[in-house]
Amino acid sequence: QVQLVESGGGLVQAGGSLRLSCAASGRTDSNYAMGWFRQAPGKERVFVARIRRSGLYTYYTESVKGRFTISRDNAKKTVYLQMNRLKPEDTAVYYCAAGSSGGPSLYEYVYWGQGTQVTVSS
């Protein structure tokens, strides 16, 4: 099995920064596309960012573009999400995911982490 473990979440004030990490273990390979999703209380899980295996192509949802940066280190089997200028609207549980494709739909990902809480205060 493939396991994904997120870390780096926490409580920050609006305008602050956090860096999330997602470490893969188990029967992993470097061909996975990786994505970040988030889910606020009472809302559905939505796409945030994704990155191809090579790391040369990235895509972000409009609400985070210019503030968040996704990157990966295949040697370390880790994907990152650098979050700057955080807003209260960013408060959610953040999940990393892996799949052989890697589009914006959560149904294209087959491996998921347990999530890490990000809370942004006003």
Image: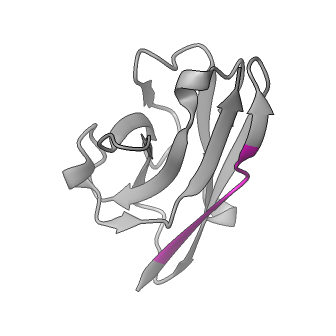
Display coloring: one colour
Q: Which of 11 and 98 is in front in this view?
A: 11
Residue at left 27%, top 40%? 103
Image quarter in which the C terminus is found: top right
Residue 34 x %, y %: 44, 51
**Image-based side of 96 in relation to 108, left or right:** right
* In magenta segment, residue 53: no
What is the count of numbered marks?
Answer: 0
Residue 65 x %, y %: 51, 16
**Image-based side of 28 in relation to 116, left or right:** left
Residue at left 63%, top 18%? 67
- Res. 80 visible in picture: no
Q: Which of 50 and 94 is in front in this view?
A: 94
Query: Residue 110: which quarter of the image?
Result: bottom left
Q: Which of 65 and 72 is in front in this view?
A: 65
The segment highlighted magenta reads 3-10
> Compared to 99, does 53 lie above or below?
above
> Compared to 87, does 56 lie above or below?
below
Query: Residue 41: which quarter of the image?
Result: top left
- Res. 57 visible in picture: yes
Main SS of the magenta part reads strand
Q: Which of 73 and 86 is in front in this view?
A: 86
Image quarter in which the N terminus is found: bottom left
> Compared to 72, does 32 lie above or below?
below
Query: Residue 85: which quarter of the image?
Result: top right
Residue 58 x %, y %: 46, 30
> Compared to 16, does 55 lie above or below?
below
